Amino acid sequence: MRPLRGGGEGLEVRLLAAKTLQAIFENQLTLEDALDREPAVAKLEPRDRAFLATLLLTTFRHLGEIRKVVDMHLAKPLPRKAGPANVILWLGAAQLLFLGTPPHAAIDLAVQCARMNTSATHFSGLINAVLRKVSASGTDVLQPLDAPRLNTPDWLWKRWRQGYGEDLARLIAAAHGSEPALDVAVKRDPGEWAGKLGGMPLPGGHVRLAPGHGAISGLPGFAEGAWWVQDAAAGMPVLLFGDLAGKTALDLCAAPGGKTLQMAAAGAEVTAVDISVSRLERLHHNIARTGLAAEVIEGDVLDLGMTQCFDAVLLDAPCSATGTIRRHPELPYLKSDLHLGELVARQRAMLVAASERVIPGGMLVYATCSLEPEEGEEQIGWFLSRHADFELAIPPSTVPPQFVAPEGWLRILPHMAIGDAVGLDGFFAAGMRRRG
Ligand SMILES: C[S@@+](CC[C@H](N)C(=O)[O-])C[C@H]1O[C@@H](n2cnc3c(N)ncnc32)[C@H](O)[C@@H]1O
């Protein structure tokens, strides 16, 4: 547990936390978007911004447990119109139960927040009383709780239980309770960079940094572009191509460019396409910082207007992103189901468009950072049943075998490990060769 500041200067951050949390629920915003829209956040000192992010991420990661404990001390749930009072209570309880904030600070600042919010003033006494009880009962109250189940909304739990069975659903949900480690993909010499960064080298050329590494831009090698941030699981789809040296590669849906850089570093001549101007800006920055080369095109995969074919085509398709819940714990609370129909249809159209850009004998890799079979296994089943000129390729030996499903595609789940590093983004990836 990380002690947080609790002095008077902490009030502004708590007020912002309550405002942001409420905006996320009311407007179905991602945490990143909600923070971007709040001008006061940009004015915070880095230390306060980090505190705000930790408080919000922790609250979402443990929201089921937090609600359960808060409800134990409420005679009846607060009415819907008590919205701000609810979020102030949850944030206070998150500090008491998971962040080791001194009780007087967590409780007093929650009460001050309530008093300063006209819709919550009325509940300030109740907030005080409930948080005092939460503090008095301590963290032992968490022990008997079924945290993985409580922290997963019903609709998502039902999905994973259907798709993976109860035991795997539980492991997936439990993995979402932990803060993800920082992995970086290294241009060359991962062993050497592991030493310089104080991290652990991982199979596939990544390095996992130890907790408490500090600001990314201040780490050795950042300024000179020796590495870029990429979860070790996100590095796996490109490995399906095998040796890329001297090959032509088309990276569709490329921004912000983790896989573009990976392919360029592996010696491919890369063309990167993405529809988003702002995300392409980040791709350009990443290319410039690392000194790697790629041709960058702003364009729509569904309207490529290109006749050239490539040795290697990657489609890292837009998806529900349920594989990234460790990083974005608010995602389950922004939806009540995934309504994947439209997304699945778009992924299929993109997959067909991508396949048309592969030379005979070349490779197509389809990837999504989703845990949902509709966006992974079922897409490949659908595609291969209609495209007899493609066949699943056996993954090269560089791909860790624990990720390879019996069918030959990759299914990476958040509780899995690579080397000694436990916990990964969830990913699906399939490599298909076009018959020559
Ligand atoms: C999963 S992200 C890609 C991540 C990227 N491959 C990486 O490794 O850094 C999906 C990307 O698809 C892009 N995208 C969505 N629809 C698109 C379309 N019709 N054409 C091109 N890009 C699209 C989004 O802008 C987004 O950058």
Image (cartoon, grey):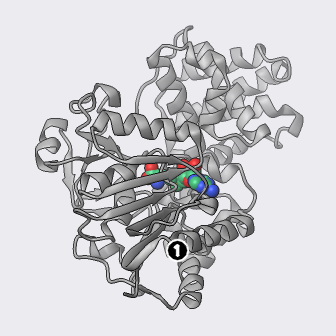
Give neighbour class at mark 1: few <14, some 14-19, many 20+ (Cα, 10 Å). Answer: some
Which amino acid, by three-letter code, is at mark 1? Glu
The image quadrant where one finds the N terminus is top left
Numbered disc 1: secondary structure: loop
Q: Nearer the viewer, residue 251 or 86?
A: 251
In the picture, measured across the screen, residue 203 lies left or right of residue 121, that is left
Query: In the figure, residue 300 lies in which quadrant?
Result: bottom right
Residue at x-position 28% and y-position 56%: 421
Instruction: Answer yes or no: disc 1 within 8 Å of ligand 1.
Output: no
- From the image, which quarter does the C terminus lie in? bottom left
Q: Which residue is mark 1?
A: 356
Residue 79 visible in image = no
**Is 132 above or below relative to 155?**
above
Vertical placement of 85 versus 341: above or below? above
Q: Position of residue 434 (x, y in %)?
A: 42, 83
**In x, y percent, where is residue 137?**
57, 38
Query: 76 and 64: which one is in front?
Result: 64
Residue at the spot 33% in from the left edge and 49% down from the top edge: 261
Residue 268's spot in the image, x, y percent? 28, 58
**Where, by quadrant of the figure, is residue 111 drawn?**
top right
Residue 347 visible in the picture: yes
Total labels: the figure holds 1
The residue shown at (62%, 72%) is 348
Q: For the view shown, which residue lies furthest in the top direction?
A: 8
Q: Nearer the viewer, residue 164 or 70?
A: 164
Residue 98: % across, % down: 50, 37
Give the answer, above or below, for where 379 lies relative to 174: below
Quarter residue 399 falls in: bottom left
